[in-house]
Amino acid sequence: MAGVMRERFVEVTAELLEAHDRLSVVTADLSADLFEQARRRYPTRVINLGIREQLLISVAGGMALAGMRPVAHSFAPFLIERPFEQIKLDLNHQNVGAVLVSAGASYDIASGGRTHQSPGDVALLATLPDWTIHVPGHPDEAEAQLRQAATGDGLVYIRLSNQSNREPYGLQGAANHRFRVLRKGSRGTVIGVGPLTDTVLAATEPFDVTVLHASTIRPFDAETLRTVLDDQGNAAVVIVEPYLAGTSVAEIAAALTDRPNRILGLGVGRQELRHYGTSRQHAIAHGLGAAGMRLSISDFLKL
Amino acid sequence: MIKAGYADLRNLMAAMTGDEKHSNAATSTLDVLWVLYDRVLRVSPAMEEERDRFYLSKGHGPMAYYAVLAAKGFLDPAEFERFGAFQSTLGHHPDRVLVPGIEISSGSLGHGLPLAVGTALGLRARGIDSAAIWVLMGDGEFDEGSNHEAIAYAGRASLEQLNVVLIDNSSASHGWPDGPEARFSTEGWAATRVDGRDHEALAAGFLRPHPGRPGVVVADVEHSSGH
């Protein structure tokens, strides 16, 4: 099986199309070539609309109204940001389900510049109710999330990335969207989200802190967070998200209203960098390399 | 539940607004809706899976739509006196979750046709070939770019099950040279224009077959000012 999330998505979806005759795939040219074989086999269920992203979401909504389970796919800015009102009205407001699968994440396409980067997609989608938002940290996690989404009927977003952890930390507990406890400590709690967890583990290696891995960020697993904090004297929580910094800080605050707490949200900055280069250079520029992350965490936790 | 005829529709609308006389804007859809529900759509309050679908894209001024649905037994006109109230199921834009017989929630312009393209594709994928999908939109709504993504794709995909009735009351601010139908024809749709108040002409336009391609009927209705 493919070791890159987008290729894995195509492989697994082709297999799921065979097993589930209500499943359909809708594209707007991106990845249409990768789905060509599946389209020849299931021409009425694998649809490429051309470069029409408003239509992409509306067609998913219309298919769901006809009893299908649609999977719509494009780069994150064109899947979530450009047709956002279609998501709000043609999916949520019609009370139908769909699976949205994006590629590109915050800066996978670093050399493509701002137009192909979408650090705000999760924050934007999280303004709507009822979305399950997956941020897989490994192709195996993405596969498990896709398989579960294909047979469900709810609203599911799967945010694929070229970045990946060495191991699929999130497979355990994936079915019920729980965080996984990777390390136990006493001085604070750090939540690594999606493919940033390996960097979080490296950054916190010298510290006596609890480390959690999240591969699903909505619904937010307040229960696991509260459970690990019960072992700690003071609630100091850092969340490291591979998209807009602070996206889930309000979720943590809401989970901890019954106790004093301090929260730090690390992630991609709001300002445009106006730089190209590589995704690693962008991570470092946003303080999401191991060294920068270690500095922010030790400063916040006074370690 | 009642069964009523065309002559009763204005009284049903008056139960919502208290007005005995309605502006042309409020009734621009009335004749089209009546002819569709009375003579064209194969749909009953049971909402069978193989029914024809009607998507009111132009969700403004839904009184005529509610009145026709009540006349055909889909919803109870007792609800009309609470039209627009907090606890009412009947808002100034319709909600499919709240109102029996309503297929899509609408109000924001340019969503009905793109949704209908998806439904046509979905029904085709499921092998339900007998169901037609009808979309009602306006010439002002036609300004929205999302419609043009849908028209181009539906033409190329030969979506024969898909039908649009576009009510032209000249409300597009910058107009449509050669009429909106020219944009459909270019994309391979079967297009025709009829008098939007003439029930026989509307029925003839609606029932004209368009094998292998989607169809649009432009219904000419007198211009009215205001929304």
Image: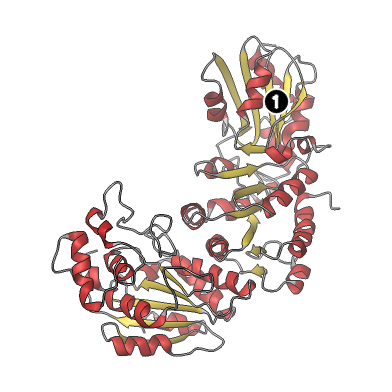
Q: Quadrant of residue A172?
A: top right
Residue at figure coordinates x 59%, y 78% from the top left: B157
Residue at the location (61% across, 69% down)?
A49
Considering every residue shown, the one lying at the far left of the view is B20
Quarter holding the C terminus of chain B? bottom left
What is the x, y in percent for residue A74?
Answer: 64, 57
Q: Is residue A49 left or right of residue A292?
A: left
Q: Is residue A39 visible?
A: yes
> How many neighbours does mark 1 have within 10 angstroms: few (below 14), some (14-19), or many (20 or more)?
many
Residue B224 visible in the current orientation: no
Residue situated furthest top in the rendering: A233
Quadrant of the snapshot with the N terminus of chain B: bottom left
Image coordinates for residue B132, horizontal then vertical, percent: 50, 78
Q: The residue under label 1 is which amino acid type?
A: Met
- Chain identifier of the residue bearing label 1 in the image: A
**Where does the image place residue A232, in percent across and percent down from the top left?**
67, 12
Q: Which residue is mark 1?
A: A293
Q: Which of these two is toward me, B104 or B15?
A: B15
Give the SS element for disc 1. helix
